[in-house]
């Protein structure tokens, strides 16, 4: 778990640096600070379980098992990328790892997860679909409509809210009527729980229970993980300033998931050094693969189209 959190952290910090150097194209939204959510949740899943993520989805992809070289190539807009340069940072998908895509429209992946849940229920193989979304998306109609349907039909779907306290730059207290988003599950007869989203083991424990419930055919669950993003909403946005204070930012930094992870997972200084060296080598390999990969051909734009 610690190694995977470190891989996510370094991949995203590297991608952000490459974006500044204009070596990564398009938009980019990093989830630095939220690694315990991705790793704690996905480590409770099997490879054939489904995840659907948001525009801030690098961490979910890596935690579900996607290889870094093909991810980096995708961000660089190369033909060897996971989606052959058609997805970029915001729309990565890797169905071979049960990753059914990053979807940039807020709340849009929840009905899709319900649809996959219906398919899983028909196939009866014990698979689970997970919808990751942010606190802002819990105010969308898609949240309420799809959860109601999943509850009625007892679909194997898990709603995982990464409450990082800001929908873009709007504070959750300003836009949401409840203190804990998990309480909204009560309206649909669904179990809801709020956990410390900076503690990978706390997240994993809640997710393991929800997965077991879904596999038993008892229907959906809602997990709210309270977390924090250390960088701005997108691209080169500020860490603090116009919509959040330096004091608030510094307070959350004290519960950095990597620091908490070292404590709860019993990572020694020697362990940490070994993990860092291995991850740095993996990141260097990913950059080299992306840089050496060819640009897509113009006619490739007409491939992978369905209507």
Image: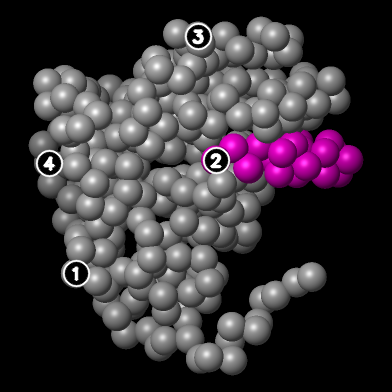
Whole-angstrom CA distance, mark 1 to mark 3, is 41 Å
Q: Earlier in the sequence, mark 2 or mark 4?
A: 2
Q: Nearer the viewer, residue 94 or 264?
A: 94
Whole-angstrom CA distance, mark 3 to mark 2, is 19 Å
Q: Is residue 302 above or below residue 111?
A: below
Give percent across and percent down for residue 61.
Answer: 47, 51
Asked if the residue at tag 1 contacts the one at tag 2, i.e. Cβ–Cβ closer than 8 Å, the answer is no
Q: Earlier in the sequence, mark 1 or mark 3?
A: 1
Q: Earlier in the sequence, mark 3 or mark 2?
A: 2
Q: Which residues are magenta?
A: 106-129
Indicate the quadrant where residue 67 lies.
bottom left
Q: Is residue 236 above or below residue 184?
A: below
Label 3 CA crowd tier, 10 Å (few <14, some 14–19, many 20+): few
Give percent across and percent down for residue 186.
Answer: 66, 8
- Name, please, the residue furthest toward the right: 122
Indicate the quadrant where residue 244 lies.
top left
Left or right, residue 302 beside residue 12: right
Whole-angstrom CA distance, mark 2 to mark 1, is 28 Å
- The secondary structure type at the circle numbered 1 is loop
Specify whether residue 281 is in view: no
Give percent across and percent down for residue 233.
Answer: 32, 42
Number of labels in the image equals 4
Whole-angstrom CA distance, mark 2 to mark 4, is 41 Å
Q: Please tell me which residue is depicted at 74% across the width and 27% down the height of the picture.
A: 145
Which tag is nearer the camera, tag 2 or tag 4? 2
| Quarter of the N terminus within the rendering | top left
Q: Which mark is residue 106?
A: 2
Q: Please tell me which residue is depicted at 24% across the width and 29% down the height of the picture.
A: 243
């Amino acid at each position: 778990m610690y190694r995977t959190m470190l891989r996510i952290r370094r991949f995203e910090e590297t991608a952000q640096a490459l974006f500044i150097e204009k070596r990564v194209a398009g938009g980019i939204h990093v989830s630095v600070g939220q690694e315990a959510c991705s790793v704690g949740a996905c480590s409770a899943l099997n490879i054939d379980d489904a995840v659907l993520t948001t525009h801030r989805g690098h961490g979910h992809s890596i935690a579900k098992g996607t290889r870094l070289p093909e991810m980096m190539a995708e961000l660089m807009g190369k033909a060897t990328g996971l989606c052959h340069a058609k997805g970029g940072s915001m729309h990565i998908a890797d169905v071979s790892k049960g990753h059914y895509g990053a979807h940039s429209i807020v709340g849009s992946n929840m009905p899709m997860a319900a649809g996959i849940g219906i398919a899983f229920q028909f196939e009866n193989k014990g698979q689970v679909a997970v919808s990751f979304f942010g606190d802002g998306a819990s105010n969308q109609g898609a949240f309420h409509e799809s959860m109601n349907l999943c509850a009625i039909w007892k679909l194997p779907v898990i709603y995982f809210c990464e409450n990082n306290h800001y929908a873009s730059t709007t504070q959750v207290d300003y836009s949401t009527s409840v203190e804990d988003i998990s309480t909204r599950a009560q309206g649909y007869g669904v179990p809801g729980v709020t956990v410390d989203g900076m503690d990978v083991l706390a997240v994993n424990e809640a997710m393991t229970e929800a997965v077991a419930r879904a596999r038993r055919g008892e229907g959906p669950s809602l997990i709210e993980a309270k977390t924090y993003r250390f960088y701005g909403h997108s691209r080169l946005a500020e860490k603090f300033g116009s919509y959040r204070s330096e004091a608030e930012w510094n307070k959350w930094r004290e519960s950095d998931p990597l620091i908490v992870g070292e404590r709860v997972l019993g990572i020694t200084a020697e362990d940490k050094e070994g993990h860092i060296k291995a991850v740095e080598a993996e990141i260097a390999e990913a950059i080299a693969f992306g840089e050496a990969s060819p640009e897509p051909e113009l006619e490739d734009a007409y491939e992978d189209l369905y209507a």
